[in-house]
Image: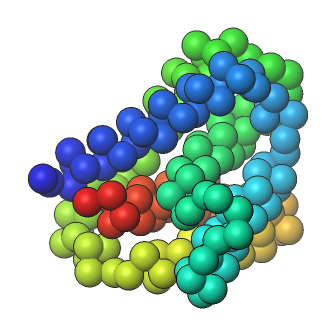
Amino acid sequence: MNTRQQFAETTAVCRDIFEKKLFDYGTSWRIMRPESITDQIYIKAMRIRSIQEKGEAKVNEGVEPEFIGIVNYSIIGLIQLHLGPGTAIPADEALALYDEWMDKATSLMLNKNHDYDEAWRHMRVSSITDIILQKLLRTREIEDHKGVTKISEGVDANYMDMINYAVFALIHLRY
């Protein structure tokens, strides 16, 4: 199976969960500021690292749901960055925005994957977790600077990278 196909299958699982949670909760996440979304992703990444280091989970969920959460919250973060926190939006609009951002993340992955020659396939899932945590710490710094950077990409680029790394981890765990 090739990367494009594995990526599509994995992101379809993430979208399915997003859609089901959209039914359960609506777009209650629209109230959240991007900084709160970053912190939510941080909690998920720290739980993954904790489970990886301890070798067990006390809560009956493994790391896969957390990586899926990182994908979905990163897309929510991108939506919030561009719409700003606000009131609920219709589910079909939320799904269209989800698809738009996932398409952009997929395009970015394909371009980077070409240039890096699938180096991620040789990475450990634990290293991917650390890179996601690093991107979160970078994102928090940029947020603390009100989005201003001197040379670096912004919060949106970090969210996009977190999506792609989390999908790579899921591919490692699934295939």
* Residue at 66% across, 40% down: 76
**Front-most of residues 137 and 19:** 19
Residue 103: x and y in percent read 39, 37
Residue 68: x and y in percent read 53, 50
Q: Is residue 74 above or below residue 138?
A: above
* Residue at 14% across, 54% down: 2
For residue 58, which quarter of the picture?
Answer: bottom right
Q: Residue furthest bottom?
A: 53
**Front-most of residues 76 and 143:** 76
Residue 49: x and y in percent read 62, 78
For residue 95, which quarter of the picture?
Answer: top right
Q: How is the image coloured?
A: rainbow
- Left or right of residue 104: residue 89: right
Q: Is residue 46 visible?
A: yes
Residue 27: x and y in percent read 75, 25
Position of the C terminus, as image quadrant, is bottom left
- Left or right of residue 14: residue 137: right
Q: Is residue 76 above or below residue 55?
A: above
* Residue at 61% across, 58% down: 61
* Residue at 56% across, 83% down: 55
**Front-most of residues 42 and 64:** 64
Q: Is residue 138 visible?
A: no
Q: What number of labels is visible?
A: 0
For residue 57, which quarter of the picture?
Answer: bottom right
Q: Residue furthest left?
A: 1
Q: Is residue 12 above or below residue 27?
A: below
**Front-most of residues 39 and 175:** 175
